[in-house]
Amino acid sequence: MPHLTTPPGAAPAATEAGRLGLGVPGYAHPLLAPAEWGELARPGTPLHWAVLNVTNGPGQRPDPHCSEAAHRLREAAGSGHRLLGHLAMRDGERAAEELVADARRFLDWYRVGGFYLAGAPADRDALPAVRRIVDTLRTMGDGLRIVLGHGTHPYAGYAETADQLVTFSGAWADYRWSQVAEWTAEYPPELFCHLVHGVPRTHLEEALRIARWQGAGTIWFTDRRGTGDPWAGMPAYWDKIVSRIGQGVSE
């Protein structure tokens, strides 16, 4: 199977130092998905981060429902819980000033712990501009986490820019035959995240094996399909995946 052909030096993500955890790319608005947001705040949930996306960003004014969800997530047990504000880069087309303005709103209104840069470019030419934006965001608070949502393997230089890179975002049919870029073997699993929709319950164990062998430290698997927004709700096997990852079982 192609995904088991791991570059030399790569290690499974489920290690004692940093077990496999969940990265939620953006549930629906808390008013529409109260159960989903409530589950994220449950003690013991192996959550690395969750993205708050009000209206393709922070919105025009504070939203009380989002404020309540953000508060509950901040107060949840476990220092690993992080709420990230959704910044739409649109493959690098948005001006840095707009992104910074959105970031300030997220910090002022929802006290987020970092930012998810959706639609981050992946090519070499865009790296200097992305690095400048990330550097600016880091000056806005201590310990802010920056996740670049490329959705594919970017140019290797991005590995030195952010706290985490989303190197796969797409359908199970593509993921099960995917392969990692060779340069990823030089970095720890904590740097990489995989987001996969359309994963059947019967293939969940296989998907977890792929993530570990490809060296991803954070994942989001759902049986929801790609029509509409597959990330808007929790998978039907939520309890199973929380239990499976929470055990920290390595392959």
Image (cartoon, grey):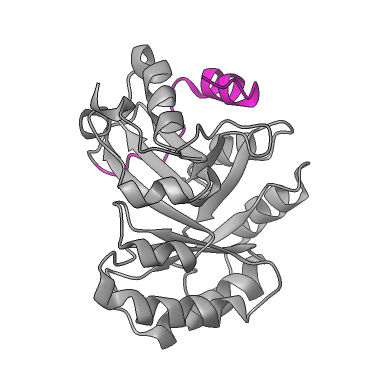
Magenta stretch: includes residue 241: yes
Which residue is at a point 50% across and 65% down the rendered structure image? 162
Residue displayed at 51% across by 41% down: 218
Say which quadrant the N terminus sits in.
top left
- Image quadrant in which you'd find residue 5: top left
Q: Residue furthest top?
A: 202
Characterize the magenta stretch by its predominant secondary structure: loop
What's the residue at 63%, 25% (across, down)? 248
Magenta region, residue range:
228-251
- Asked if residue 86 is positioned above or below residue 46 in the image, the reply reads below
Front residue (pair 121, 197): 121
Q: Is residue 104 above or below residue 81?
A: below
Is residue 21 found left or right of 54 in the rendered image?
right
Question: Where in the figure is residue 88, as x and y percent of width and height?
Answer: 37, 68
Instruction: Please check the rendered image and state whether residue 173 is part of the magenta-colored stretch, yes or no.
Output: no
Q: Position of residue 132 (x, y in %)?
A: 45, 83
Q: Is residue 76 above or below residue 207?
A: below
| Residue furthest front as drawn | 8
**One can see residue 49 in this view:** yes
Q: Position of residue 59 (x, y in %)?
A: 47, 70
When the figure is inspected, residue 22 is found, relative to residue 113, above or below; the finding is above
Please give the count of numbered marks on the rendered protein. 0
Q: Determine if residue 56 is in view.
A: no
Residue 131 percent location from the top left of the image: 44, 77
Where is residue 202, by image quadrant?
top left
In the shown orientation, is residue 166 left or right of residue 238?
Answer: left
Residue at the image point whose x is 25% and y is 35% from the top: 178
Q: Nearer the viewer, residue 119 or 85?
A: 119
